[in-house]
């Protein structure tokens, strides 16, 4: 494992194997400089144990950077369960993982991610206190409104820095995917006077946006190359790749989807085309901010929204630095995160 490309001085990697309940999982703690390692649990039918380990290593490293740039007192961690969430997920399996998290005595805080629901986090909570995103007493729970708010603030900042405009009013903005995050983002953009161009695999959803936000609907295979000022990918990862980048017409890419760049080199390819790509992990931190506050027992909703709104300032800083240093926003963001982490721990390399 130490020789894998995905290994980046991870602090602890725990393989959890409980065949009696069908559990094979990996808990990866990348860094604890700023606090306990916080990151969700993903359940996915990985082809083999190595693929699961690599995913846990990559995702936990990403959480270190996301949490640092969101100004949270948390390090980066992540857990992955090998298996199909629709077929293999049982209460006993989730409890066994929660017991393994509990044995780490708070060094890793688990939450939800792909394949793991809020109801599952409540099962975790039955066995360990080290869980976020459970949604108790009307606080916390579904983080997507906060994710969308953070994306909107960051998108506004990118428009200010890149286009020199004080708001999105009158700009054409494309939104790919109108799910929990994309729909709410479209709502914010519409209220702020942007002209929306949207696409969703769910045609009904797209038609609702046409009616509610006066949006132009495009087929799903046309949204990436739409004639827009800003493109907000809010569906799947990997959409910015060698196939799509030459066809993009937006000046700015700022959306909520995780892992939008297929490879790190695609960040450079976007910059070479003069397209400003705002790193997804900076924009979509609203969700983890909500989870972090909930875990810390801070019920001051206003403080949470305040921290989410600060994503706008962070995006502004990153884009200014990138411009000043003649580098890409991805590299500027990584460098800023590394600076926030200080130099007390092992050296890291920007992606
Ligand atoms: P969701 O599942 O509610 O919505 C995704 C939407 O995208 C669905 O409406 C789906 O029909 C549509 N879609 C899928 N493939 C598409 C395609 N090729 N073209 C157009 N539309 C397509 O998911 P959610 O929660 O809105 O998340 C969206 C993205 O944001 C994901 O990448 C997720 O990892 C990321 N994210 C979400 C957070 C949250 O708080 N929900 C937090 C951080 C990141």
Image (cartoon, helix red, strand yellow):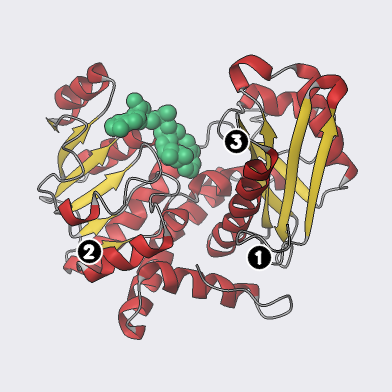
Q: In front here: 72 or 55?
A: 55
Q: Is residue 185 left or right of residue 305?
A: left
Q: Helix, strand or loop at disc 2?
A: loop
In the rendered image, residue 185, in percent from the top left (x then y), is placed at 32, 40
Q: Is residue 266 left or right of residue 8?
A: left
Which residue has dot 3 on it?
Answer: 140
Residue 237 is at least partly visible in this image: yes
Check disc 2: other Cα within 10 Å, few if <14, some if 14-19, many if 20+: many
Q: Quadrant of the N terminus?
A: bottom right
Q: In the picture, residue 6 is in which quadrant?
A: bottom right
Residues under numbered marks 1 and 2 in contact, where contact means CB atoms less than 8 Å apart: no
Which residue has dot 2 on it?
Answer: 275
Q: Residue furthest bottom?
A: 325
Q: Nearer the viewer, mark 3 or mark 1?
A: 1
Which residue has dot 1 on it?
Answer: 8
Q: In front here: 239 or 159?
A: 239
Residue depicted at 88% across the width and 47% down the height: 105
Q: In the picture, residue 110 is in which quadrant?
A: top right
């Amino acid at each position: 494992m130490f020789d894998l490309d995905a290994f980046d001085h991870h602090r602890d990697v725990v393989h959890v194997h409980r065949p009696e309940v069908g559990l094979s999982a990996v808990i990866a703690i990348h860094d604890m400089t700023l606090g306990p390692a916080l990151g969700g649990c993903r359940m996915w039918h990985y082809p083999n144990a190595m693929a699961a380990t690599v995913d846990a290593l990559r995702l936990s490293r990403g959480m270190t950077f996301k949490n640092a740039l969101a100004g949270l007192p948390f390090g980066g961690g992540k857990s992955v369960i090998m298996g199909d969430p629709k077929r293999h997920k049982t209460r006993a399996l989730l409890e066994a993982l929660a017991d393994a998290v509990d044995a780490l005595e708070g060094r890793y805080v688990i939450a939800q991610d792909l394949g793991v629901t809020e109801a599952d986090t409540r099962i975790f909570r039955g066995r360990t206190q080290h869980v976020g995103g459970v949604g108790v007493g009307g606080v916390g729970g579904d983080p997507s409104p906060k994710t969308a708010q953070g994306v909107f603030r960051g998108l506004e900042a990118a428009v200010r820095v890149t286009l020199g405009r004080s708001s999105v009013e009158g700009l054409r903005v494309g939104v790919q995917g109108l799910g929990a995050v994309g729909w709410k983002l479209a709502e914010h953009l519409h209220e702020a006077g942007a002209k929306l161009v949207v696409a969703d695999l769910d045609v009904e959803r797209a038609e609702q946006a046409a009616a509610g936000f006066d949006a132009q609907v495009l087929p799903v295979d046309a949204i990436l190359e739409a004639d827009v000022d800003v493109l907000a990918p809010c569906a799947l990862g990997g959409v910015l790749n060698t196939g799509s980048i030459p066809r993009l017409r937006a000046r700015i890419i700022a959306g909520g989807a995780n892992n939008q760049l297929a490879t790190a080199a695609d960040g450079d390819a976007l910059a070479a085309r003069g397209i400003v790509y705002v790193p997804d992990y900076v924009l979509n931190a609203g969700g983890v901010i909500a989870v972090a506050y909930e875990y810390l027992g801070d019920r001051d909703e206003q403080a949470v929204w305040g921290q989410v709104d600060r994503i706008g300032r962070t995006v502004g800083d990153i884009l200014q630095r990138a411009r000043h240093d003649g580098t890409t926003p991805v590299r500027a963001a990584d460098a800023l995160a590394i600076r926030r982490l200080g130099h007390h721990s092992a050296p890291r390399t920007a992606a």
